[in-house]
Amino acid sequence: GGPVPPKRGLVRRYGGKLFLGLLAGGTGLFAYEVYNARHPPQQFDWDHSKKTIAILGSGWAATSLLKELDTEHYNVIVVSPRNYFLFTPLLPSTTVGTVELRSIMMPMRYITRFKERAVAFVEGVCNEIDTKNKILVVEDNSEIVGEVSKQNIPYDYLVVACGAENATFGIPGVKDYACFLKEAWDAKKIRTRLMDCMETAAFAGQTEKEVERLLHMVVVGGGPTGVEYAAELYDFLKEDLASWYPEIAPKIKITLVEALPHVLPSFSKELITYTEKHFAEAKMSILSNTMVKEVKQKELVVQNPQKEIEHIPYGLLVWATGNTARPVVADLIKKLSPALQNQRRGLVVDEYLKVKGVDDVYALGDASATKWAPTAQVASKQGVYIAGIFNQLGRINADRHAIMADGQDPNVVAAQRIKPFDYEHLGALAYIGSDKAIADLPGNVHIGGALTFWFWRSAYLNNLFSLRNRVLVAFDWGKKSLFGRDISRE
Ligand code: FAD
Ligand code: NAI
């Protein structure tokens, strides 16, 4: 006989077929998800014999609740001044164009249209909660207002998930001159103002002192929002502005003002030191133990660690000093018993997230005052938990007759099945610039650096709301690496 062909290994023999099979399967799944996302199903109409749940907000808590809620047992109405969900962890990236804003937004109707029963969405701001008559007073506060711009919405159950607003501590001038970083429009405003500062500084004949002021980017608040924003700004400066504005880019200064001795008070000591060292190497100044007293149009008035008053000229000021209660929440707190509602930052709830002192009202996320930090992680888990309670109560109510025929009391069954909210912290991540991130993980693990950056990226990509968002963000990252960030002033 002729030469014996060499035996082929399993991988060499079937590897190609396996690869092709996986590719075809993956493409099929992708196409199926894309098709489904654009073809919402038929929905059941509202059923007036069922109870109505009103949800205030379209943020982390509200959307995770909505996603898990079984609409078989309820009518649902969502009220929010913005008609989309915003993936806040990537919001700092949008201030400089590392990621585009629309890539991290998810229209609420892409969510409500996929529920079994039609979910009503009202774009409006709830100004008042009348818990006695179970009515929400809602107003259309958008630019275009029709003949009807106010309505009273009745509810049976209310979930307050309207988040919090930026704390200013009543410091004069903050609301007039600083930019916040909480909403999509804040990020857009920062991006526009930043480029305006650049072009104004480049304007022929500008004095040296004025150029210095315009290029001084100040961030007040060394929490994760302030640190991540400063980090993005630094990347923009090094990777893009330096090439397009060679004369003035070297004059850009980034300063972080923090009232406490260190930045990132909620992170571990090792990671605080790591971040502060990284900032020092990048020549971003941290003014710690420094209290802002007043904000003027072109300068900050601060008290330095020696208790002296200093004036700091700035071009762009971003204010990120944490949260305070929204007016609608503050108003509800005032109406309830001060013995039960004694927190200014939000509504006090029991272990089932029920607002203390009122029936059938729950509060989740940043709108509530709990022992947990006001994070997306907590808010989304609370949303899932409340959906679980409603689903359970809905089922028990539907089976009420069978349960009673079994000699059981439905209320007792409900009490047995519904457990208090329990939170398992998965860790905290933050981006600190130059493709480096930090992570405080369970089990006392504190890591930082380039590898953590890839962990940060994959965690966020994975957590994005939909396949559409994941694709858009991945494209944005790729686009930035290929072409750099866009420096147009919108
Ligand atoms: P939000 O998500 O703020 O949603 C509130 C909703 O209520 C919004 O839709 C709003 O329009 C609506 N609303 C406002 N007023 C009214 C009203 N009167 N009536 C009806 N609706 C109203 N957390 C993390 O865990 N990890 C992170 O990496 C992270 N990064 C962040 C980055 C930034 C820049 C910011 C600002 C926050 C970040 N957070 C992060 C915190 C996280 O975003 C919040 O804790 C989370 O958004 C809280 O969810 P929420 O649903 O309570 O409120
Ligand atoms: P924060 O409350 O975490 O930090 C605010 C910082 O501002 C504090 O360090 C505080 O000492 C400082 N400050 C307060 N008043 C000041 C003043 N007058 N002058 C100077 N400094 C002052 O607020 P932040 O960063 O807005 O975050 C809000 C919430 O969102 C937090 O719970 C945070 O954990 C979460 N978040 C989480 C992120 C992440 O995990 N990557 C990113 C952004 C926010």
Image: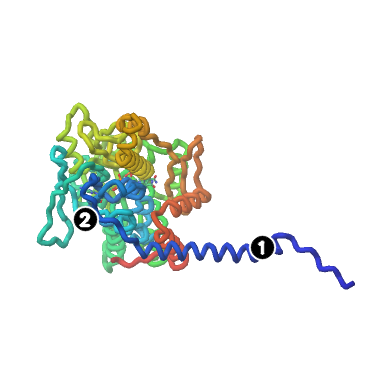
SS category of the residue bearing label 2:
strand
Label 1 secondary element: helix
Quarter that holds the N terminus: bottom right
Q: Amino acid at mark 1?
A: Gly
Location of residue 204 in the rendering, given as x and y in whole percent from the top left corner: 28, 69
| Coloring scheme used | rainbow
In the image, taking residue 217 as reference, residue 5 lies left or right, namely right
Q: Is residue 449 left or right of residue 287?
A: right
Whether residue 26 is visible, yes or no, is yes
Quadrant of image for the C terminus: bottom left
Q: Position of residue 249 (x, y in %)?
A: 37, 61
Q: Residue beneath label 2, please?
A: 123
Q: Position of residue 317 (x, y in %)?
A: 28, 52
Q: Nearer the viewer, residue 86 or 449?
A: 86
Q: Mark 1: give few (<14), some (14-19) or many (20+) Cα within 10 Å.
A: few
Instruction: Name the residue beneath numbered marker 1.
Output: 15
> Label 2 is placed on what type of residue?
Glu
Q: Nearer the viewer, residue 100 or 369?
A: 369
